[in-house]
Amino acid sequence: MSSSLSFKNILVVGLGLIGGSILQSLKSRSYQGNTYGIDSNLLAIDKANELGLIENKDKNIKGDLQNLLIIFSVPTLSITKAINDLNLQTEDVLYTDTCSVKSSVLEDIKKRKPEFFSKFILSHPIAGSEQSGLSAASSTLFDKRLTIVSPHEKNIEEDISRVEEFWRNLGSLTKRLPANSHDDLFAKTSHLPHVISFALMDSIFKDLNDETFLYSGGSLEDYTRIASSDPVMWKDIMIANEKPIIESIAHFKESLEMLAELIQKKDPVELTNFFTAIKTSRDQLLTEEK
Amino acid sequence: MSSSLSFKNILVVGLGLIGGSILQSLKSRSYQGNTYGIDSNLLAIDKANELGLIENKDKNIKGDLQNLLIIFSVPTLSITKAINDLNLQTEDVLYTDTCSVKSSVLEDIKKRKPEFFSKFILSHPIAGSEQSGLSAASSTLFDKRLTIVSPHEKNIEEDISRVEEFWRNLGSLTKRLPANSHDDLFAKTSHLPHVISFALMDSIFKDLNDETFLYSGGSLEDYTRIASSDPVMWKDIMIANEKPIIESIAHFKESLEMLAELIQKKDPVELTNFFTAIKTSRDQLLTEEK
């Protein structure tokens, strides 16, 4: 790995599930460079140091920081403060992040110095868990998952490739997508399912209270798993990507109301046709994918 | 198993995923009695016979059929025809079914002869897959899953216990719940999630077409898995349990609209509180369950 991973130093800002998993993954792959980590919670730095994931024992990072990659792995709306708080004397550096919304991060970095902006390559590893925090971190979190890289107009190809290579070295696949396309797409395919899960849990709790899972036999647990996701992370995503999310909720409601009408009509042919069309498209797309 | 399973003969009507899995499970547990199976599709009978799951080669079932359990494992709305078509000369028999809606089956059997009605114990194994048909059947489908048994006023305790024991012998847990409670509950915990999955797929397909799964990295596939469920089975469930399902959709829409308002307000405190309350309740209930 040391030969293909071109950074001599890696600093992770934010030692949660994703940041911790990056460090775990580097460790399990015997990364030969130096790893550092900071977090607003000093206990997380202690813990990461104890686990042998980072060299530093507190917020002070010393040493030769040439050829450095800095990864901001904080909730989407915390990135402004995380960048502001960074106090490092180094010029030989690339920046990336792991935020789930890209336009809001792009907006922030655009306002900063051109030499910072041009060296910041937006990333989003599509990996996670309803677990959060360093203790849930895993060296295999990115294995065969996808990382979206969202280059902007001031990035150069060499830097973009180095960041993509970094993710591929952690086991991830990579694809490129502009920030606004990313946000529109993930509003539908990720943020909307989370909205639905939270709302579904809310409505079932109101009806069934303590009996919610009593008779479900496991499938409701599976289906609502993402409603246990990190509240702060998802509060940030909802705020940062509000417009595309509200639009995707509106589209979903149209489909829901249309299906509710079909159910009320109790028309066996229309219902069968509707379910068959969905199943056929879904199965076909997933077969083609493989 | 032969000692604890008190039926000498078992007939499965409907050789799909559930019926096939009952037979696979009996076979893997070396059931010592005789097993029979019929299906409106003669090829399914052929196939089940070839696999050594049933003794009969066609719809004609011969032999000593004393001490028989007949399991109707057909889509909910097909049970009337399945019962009508049954043409067996035996009196020493108990009946059960595997339908996902219980009130509509109860309504049907109530209209029949008292000696038939009293010997029919309603069951619903909470196990399934987005796969359907005999080829998807599995001997472990019921392992540690739950089967709801819905006794009615004319059942006797001895018969109910024998049917419960049958399910426990296939690896399932059992719980009792009256038919109408079952239908209200599963409208919320199972039928509603399916409605949501179908509607979500529909709305995403309309927006993204062939690109639906292109960037999802696996989680959307997981989340919409149940939208590939058997169309005929789910058409029947929607029609048979229409009222409770429409009511559960209405409750869910209230929660969805409330959350959409919170997102539009972009109030970080209210959003965090809402997500935290959901996560806390969910995690707590699932911890207590274990």
Image (spheres, coloured by chain):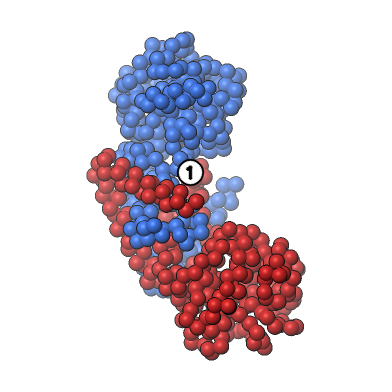
Chain colours: A blue, B red
Q: In which quadrant of the rendered image does the N terminus of chain A lie?
A: top right
Q: Which residue is drawn at 49% across and 17% down?
A: A55
Question: Dot 1: few (<14), some (14–19), or many (≥20) neighbours within 10 Å?
Answer: many
Position of residue A87 in the picture relative to residue A64 (left or right): left
Q: Residue at x 39, y 57 (%)?
A: A210
Q: In this view, does B287 lie above or below B8?
A: above
Q: Which of A41 and A249 is in front in this view?
A: A41
The x, y position of residue B119, in whole percent, is: 57, 82
Disc 1 on helix, strand or loop?
loop
Position of residue A85 in the picture relative to residue B72 (left or right): left
Q: Which residue is drawn at 40% across and 37% down?
A: A100
Res. A251 visible in picture: no
Q: Nearer the viewer, residue B276 or B236?
A: B276
Q: Nearer the viewer, residue A40 or B216?
A: A40
Res. A247 visible in picture: yes
Q: In this view, does A19 lie above or below A255?
A: above
* Chain containing mark 1: B
Q: In which quarter of the image is residue A133?
A: top left
Q: Name the residue under label 1.
A: B216
The x, y position of residue A39, in whole percent, is: 39, 25
Residue farthest to the top, as pictured: A64
Q: Which residue is drawn at 58% across and 78% down?
A: B159
The x, y position of residue A200, in whole percent, is: 38, 55
Q: What amino acid is labelled 1 in the image?
A: Ser
